[in-house]
Image (tube, rainbow, N blue to C red):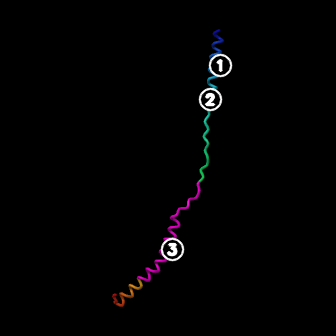
């Protein structure tokens, strides 16, 4: 009887160990990086174009101011 109880306890112990086995898997997916276009790129282009456009007007204004100062004329 003692041998049967011992065998039952040992087999119950091994069955418990077999039932408690777990495995964990972590799936690592690649990160996709997409290009980002920011509107500041367009604003810089527009800002440069406006500088070029108004730069001509500013240069003409400075030229007029120089001519007026040379001639001594005041309005």
Work out which quarter of the rendered image holds the C terminus and state it. Answer: bottom left
Q: Is residue 3 above or below residue 59?
A: above
Hey, which quadrant is residue 3 in on the image? top right
Residue 25 appears at what percent x and percent y? Answer: 62, 38
Q: Residues within 10 Å of mark 3 (few under 14, many from 20)?
A: few
Residue 11 - label = 1
Q: In the depicted view, which residue is nearer to us: 52 or 23? A: 52
Q: Does residue 11 belong to the magenta stretch?
A: no
Label located before the other in sequence (1 or 2): 1
- Look at discs 3 and 1 and give the one toward the viewer: 3
* Residue holding disc 2: 21
Q: Is residue 35 above or below residue 45?
A: above
Instruction: Give the total of numbered labels.
Output: 3
Residue 60 appears at what percent x and percent y? Answer: 44, 83
Label located before the other in sequence (3 or 2): 2
Residue 48 appears at what percent x and percent y? Answer: 49, 72
- Residue at the limit of the structure toward the top, as seen here: 1
* Residue holding disc 3: 49
Q: Taking 67 as reference, is 42 left or right?
A: right
Real-space Cα distance between discs 3 and 1? Answer: 86 Å
Q: In the depicted view, which residue is nearer to us: 69 or 39? A: 39
Q: Does residue 45 belong to the magenta stretch?
A: yes
Q: Is residue 51 above or below residue 29?
A: below
Residue 6 appears at what percent x and percent y? Answer: 63, 14
Residue drawn at x 58%, y 54% is: 33
- Residue at the limit of the structure toward the bottom, as seen here: 71
Dominant SS of magenta comes to helix
Q: Residues within 10 Å of mark 2 (few under 14, many from 20)?
A: few
Mark 1: secondary structure = helix
Q: Which residues are magenta?
A: 33-61
Label located before the other in sequence (3 or 1): 1
């Amino acid at each position: 009887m003692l041998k049967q109880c011992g065998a039952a306890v040992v087999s119950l112990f091994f069955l418990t160990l077999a039932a408690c086995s777990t495995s964990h898997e972590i799936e690592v997916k690649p990160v996709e990086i997409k290009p980002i276009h920011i509107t500041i790129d367009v604003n810089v282009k527009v800002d440069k174009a406006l500088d070029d456009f108004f730069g001509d007007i500013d240069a003409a204004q400075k030229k007029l101011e120089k001519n007026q100062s040379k001639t001594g004329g005041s309005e």
